[in-house]
Image (cartoon, rainbow, N blue to C red):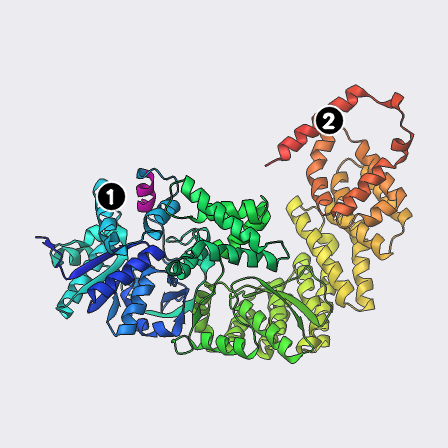
Amino acid sequence: MAKDLPERVTLLGIRHHGPGSARMVEAALERTEPEIVLIEGPPEGDALLGHVPDLTPPVALLLHDEAEPASAAFWPFAAFSPEWRAMVWANARGVPVRFFDLAAAASLAEEPSGARKASLDPLGTLAEAAGFDDPERWWEDVVEHHTDPADLAEAVAEAMTALREEFADEVDDRTLRREAAMRQNLRQALKDTDGPVAVVCGAWHVPALRTLPPASTDAAMLKGLPKKKVSGTWVPWSHGKLATASGYGAGIDSPGWYAHLWECAPRGDTVARWFARACTVLRAEDLPASTASAVEAVRLADTLAALRGRPSPGLSEVMEAAKAVLCNGDQVPLDLIHDRLVVGERLGEVGADVPTSPLAADLDRLTRRLRLPLNATPKQIRLDLRKDTDRERSKLLRRLEVLDVPWGTPDTTRTLGTFAEAWQLHWKPEFAVALATAARHGTTVAAAADQVLTGRAADATRVVDAAETLSRSVGCEIPTAVTAARTALDRCAAAATDALELLAALPDLATTVRYGSVRGTDPELLRVALHGLLARGAVGLPLACRGVDDDTAERAIAAVDGADDAVRLAADDDHRDTWRQALRSLVAMPDAHGLPTGRATRLLWESGALDSDAVAARLHRAVSLAAGATAFVAGFLRGSAALLTADPRLFGVVDDWLSGLTTADFEAALPLLRRAVAEFSPAERRMLGDRVKGSTRGATATAADWDEALATRLATHVRSLLAEAAP
């Protein structure tokens, strides 16, 4: 038979990451002075609870399967999380504190990605019953602005009990297993002490803990759950990752606002301090925000709350007042306030004494030595590779990329020269899982990256894969990996017979040749490999483009573009001539697909190997043939439009061909032409438009030449094409 819970047990049903619940928990613990505190969470984390004094929230408990580190989950806590306040209270008083939820070994087997949302939203249901369309706003009114936390726990328990009774059929099996584990751990705590016990758990679980069924019933429900060896640590978390928008199942819409409520509510000046912070944010962006405006915003927020019958201004009133007074109705600065203050990107800290993997410890040592702190907000940096510290920073970021920890992303949109790099740094808490996974490769970042790159070189079967591995190895400045990748490149090249595959490897290799000396690698050794691939690819290019389908032609045009860039970047004069001869052979090849043929013609023209007369003749010949004309012109148009608009003869050939197409032929040509023109910059498109308007036909047209019927048909046709293209 089920037994009622002993009176010495205090059930504290909370909302995860709710400051009102946090105040309620602290008050209840002070009042009951428990001898054991149980907190919702995986028991495998108990060994890490002693490190609470070494942590600055937000932080997360990270647990992972030792055999498969990628199978991991996080349990996050903010300074205003009720569970965190219970940990801090217990730790400060020497009171034993335990996690008492389902074991992480079982949770990881069911949901390796971590927390999920329940099918039923208890808060949303209660908010709807109270006449609120926003659960966050309802919670603020009844909890966050609650002045007496003493009776809050019982009120929440009663509400949840009624809800569980009404929606009993919607309680899933996983929740039932979790609650069985909670009861088993609660039974153990009752055996371990005769004194008071406090239980801090999600309010939804409180009704299931008010009575204890026979232990055998719960044991049967937990029988057969998977067992794994689980390891863990504490990792920094951020307010942004606590937000619902991040995908976190127990997330809240406004972690920054809740942090502000927690910090300022005891002083009674929550709203005033909020607007002071908002003004600081706006001023930092050179936006006007006076003290007088802040005072007026406070008054407006108070007035809105009074009109709506709220106990004090909530987030909705504060943001409405901010938009009206501080932002002058403009949404852009309001979005800035939302991102910086409502959500926020506060990043927690983990002390040096917290156990971690040797790899994570090495990364921490490197970031400190190189003065690269982990940052939760994106940050742009520029590195000068002639400086030892900047070069070491670049090596670290590239090695982490190899380990699937992309803390830094290279900014390839900026051309900074041989000795400079631009990076965007943005640390994300989930990188801790990637670090745990990468720890199997080595105990240091350098050793782990070396093993990964050497393994990739050994496994490479395509030339392009070997070239990419070589490029990464040079960037990481790992000599053993460079040697292994160079050997793999020779092996794959010897076995390759596809000219397009050989040419596709050239861009990575050319970049490596150009920047190899900066990274301590002899570029001439790499240049020999580049020339060998180029010579073989050039010989086979014409035949590789003959009689192929459209997909292969797209692959060919990409290979031609990449190879041409590589030749200009790193090839010597003799091999440049070899490449141009390959392009000439492609242009002259019968039955070659129009896309790469047209592109090759364009490249020869731009390099000066073909003059405008020769190109015009080829264009005339191509457009005079119905088959393949569109592909040739589309290939020729690929790239920049500047040279085309500057040459009236070539422009006229393309314009005449396009103007002479029938409606059916134009519709058939449109997909290829649209793709070619899509690569033009806005400025180039304007140049083309001006060139068309200034053509002979446009210049000599008069009002008498206007054909109203033709114009109407044309406009109707264009509208139909645009409608078809619209998503």
**Residue 715 circle label:** 2
Look at 22% across and 63% down and name the residue there: 31
The vertical placement of 13 against 393, above or below, is above
Q: Earlier in the sequence, mark 2 or mark 1?
A: 1
Residue 262 spot, x, y in % from top left: 39, 59
Q: Residue at x 31, y 39 (%)?
A: 130
> Taking 682 as reference, is 207 left or right?
left
Which structural element holds mark 1? helix
Where residue 712 appears, as percent x and y from the top left, is: 75, 22
Question: Residue type at mark 1?
Answer: Leu
Q: How many marks?
A: 2
Q: Residue 121 colored magenta?
A: yes
Q: Is residue 719 visible?
A: yes
Question: Which stretch did the figure color magenta?
Answer: 119-128
State the residue lying farthest toward the left: 1
Up/down of 210 relative to 697, above or below: below
**Residue that extends furthest to the top in the rendered view of this protein:** 709
Above/below status of 446 relative to 115: below
The answer for how far apart the CA atoms under marks 2 and 1 are is: 61 Å
User: Amino acid under label 2?
Assistant: Ala
> In this rendering, which labeled residue sits more in front, label 2 or label 1?
1
Q: In screen coordinates, is 714 left or right of 199?
A: right
Per the rendering, the mark at residue 163 is: 1
